[in-house]
Image: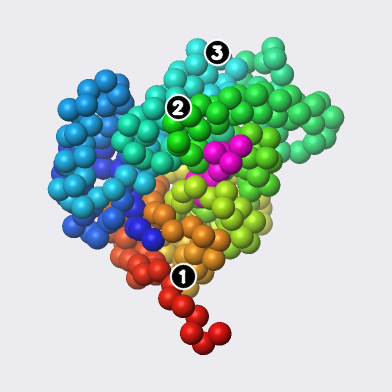
Amino acid sequence: MDVGVLTVPLGDQPRESAFEYLAGLGVDAVELGCGGYPGSDHVDRSALLSDPDARDALRDDLDAHDLRVSALATHNNPLHPDEQRAAEADRELREAIELAALLDVGTVTCFSGLPAGGPNDEVPNWVTTPWPGEHANAHEYQWEVATEYWRELASYADEHDVDLAIEMHPNMLIYEPTGLLELRERTSERVGANFDPSHLYWQGIEITDAIRLLGEAIHHVHAKDTRVYDEQVRTKGVLDTTAYDEVADRAWLFRSVGYGHGEDHWRDVVSTLRMVGYDGALSIEHEDALTSASEGLEKGVELLRRVVFEDQPGDAFWA
């Protein structure tokens, strides 16, 4: 099991410098943004698609620091009711799939996207309750839109032998494990999870139970923590629209690994991932407003290095 990092927080550094820094921390793998919200600071998607020399240069940078790419990341909304925005997100996704195939990277991480509540609406609509009834109708419409889109995209990914790892995220159609499994059932096994526990903690989802439920549907994992502040939850609940940088007033905050849940919890996470057959990267995504990217990454890598399994299980000689 590899310790990885989504390199977005290091986007102000040249790629080679970022790789050198991460390798020095003991990182094994990098997740590279190539469009959408993650941006493309370390990966020029168009250049890499068209220029074999550019791809060779990326491979050289990786090899020089003994790193592998765990996934290409392009998080956006391909189901947006604005046709231009949806088309741009779709193009990013398809080009990420093509590039992943060229680089022998097996996974693209992404969002499910979120449609509007009806064909004439202009704004994506996150439906969280079925009443009044128009919300249930809107949700049904959204699933029809999503199923058609993701079924076709999954076929495109399959043609390129690439998995689609959807991050379960609020304000997206897929934000919890049962929805992820429903989309997978409606489409194909190419559709799975980028298992990011940070969005599940505040929903009250038990992380190890969710891992067991998803099982082989987990294509990639983000190592990202969350701290829920009960004194805020007791008065405002967990659906908190307070700005992320107003840290004292939020019901929950994204935290560096180990600052929302202790080392014993992360040992359980790693162990449960192994139980269900996942042996890929734990890709640290730093979004902790209480510390710098470098400190958050360094502390996260230090903890994960202690808890990940490096060897394969031996024979159960005691059985």
Disc 3 marks which residue?
Answer: 83
| Magenta span dominant secondary structure | strand
* Amino acid type, callout 2: Leu
Looking at the rendered structure, the secondary structure element under dot 3 is helix
On screen, residue 41 above or below 66: above
* Amino acid type, callout 1: Arg
Give the camera-side residue of 90 and 124: 90
Question: Is residue 180 rendered to the left or right of residue 247?
Answer: right
Q: Is residue 253 visible?
A: no
Looking at the rendered structure, the secondary structure element under dot 2 is helix
Cα distance between the residues tagged 2 and 3: 15 Å
**Tag count in the figure?**
3
What is the magenta range? 188-195
> Which numbered disc, 3 or 1, marks the residue that appears first in the sequence?
3
Q: Magenta stretch: residue 165 in it?
A: no
Disc 1 marks which residue?
Answer: 267
Quadrant where the N terminus is found in the figure: bottom left
> Which numbered disc, 1 or 2, marks the residue that appears first in the sequence?
2
Looking at the rendered structure, the secondary structure element under dot 1 is helix
Q: Position of residue 219 (x, y in %)?
A: 49, 47
